[in-house]
Amino acid sequence: MKVNRARLAAWVVFAAFAAGVVSFLPHAGPLEAQAQNLGMRTVSGVVVDGSSSPVPAATVFLKNQKTKAIRSYTSTKDGRFYFAQVNMAEDYDLWAEKDGRKTATKTVSSWDSRKNFETELKMK
């Protein structure tokens, strides 16, 4: 029975090493801790009007579909907006508003593997 326990223990250590839970490098921790920022993306783009001219000072919203948390950004004079550290494992709604006008809502999907999600939001 002791031989089987020793083999089981060796298997558990090997499996933990293979899965990245245990590391033999002195400076390295679990892979989850090292890879946290790999799951982040940027969401950026431009807000334009019906004639494709930039819309400055529009409020751009990024809403997490699960938690309902909302982030906002005021577009620059050339209509640009930018959100950093957007979790790739979550789905988001993205839209802009200004002076009672609103763009269509776009979805930033967790199925989209782009690290830099860039889009155009067109005012109605």
Image: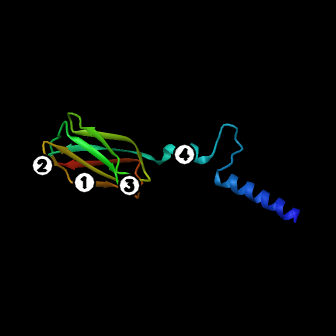
Q: Earlier in the sequence, mark 3 or mark 4?
A: 4
Q: Earlier in the sequence, mark 3 or mark 2?
A: 2
Q: Is the C-beta separation of discs 3 and 1 under 8 Å?
A: no
Query: Can you tell which of label 4 and label 2 is closer to the viewer?
Result: 4
Of the numbered discs in the image, which one, if any, rests on residue 105?
1
Query: Can you tell which of label 3 and label 2 is closer to the viewer?
Result: 3
Query: Can you tell which of label 3 and label 1 is closer to the viewer?
Result: 3
Residue shown at the point (43%, 51%) measured from the top left: 88
Whole-Å distance between the Cαs marked 1 and 2?
16 Å
Determine which residue is flagged by label 4: 35
Whole-Å distance between the Cαs marked 3 and 2?
31 Å
SS of the residue at dot 2? loop
Query: Can you tell which of label 1 and label 2 is closer to the viewer?
Result: 1
Residue shown at the point (11%, 47%) measured from the top left: 51
Q: Earlier in the sequence, mark 3 or mark 1?
A: 3
Query: Can you tell which of label 1 and label 4 is closer to the viewer?
Result: 1
Whole-Å distance between the Cαs marked 1 and 4?
31 Å
Whole-Å distance between the Cαs marked 3 and 4?
23 Å
| Three-letter amino acid code at the position of disc 3 | Lys
| Three-letter amino acid code at the position of disc 2 | Gly
| Three-letter amino acid code at the position of disc 1 | Thr
Q: Earlier in the sequence, mark 1 or mark 2?
A: 2
SS of the residue at dot 4? loop
Determine which residue is flagged by label 3: 66
Query: Can you tell which of label 3 and label 4 is closer to the viewer?
Result: 3
| Three-letter amino acid code at the position of disc 4 | Ala
Residue shown at the point (21%, 39%) measured from the top left: 79
Instruction: Count residues near mark 2 (Cα–Cα under 10 Å), then give few for <14, some for 14-19, many for 20+.
Output: few
Instruction: Count residues near mark 1 (Cα–Cα under 10 Å), then give few for <14, some for 14-19, many for 20+.
Output: some
Determine which residue is flagged by label 2: 50
The spot of residue 110 in percent (x, y) is 40, 56
SS of the residue at dot 1? loop
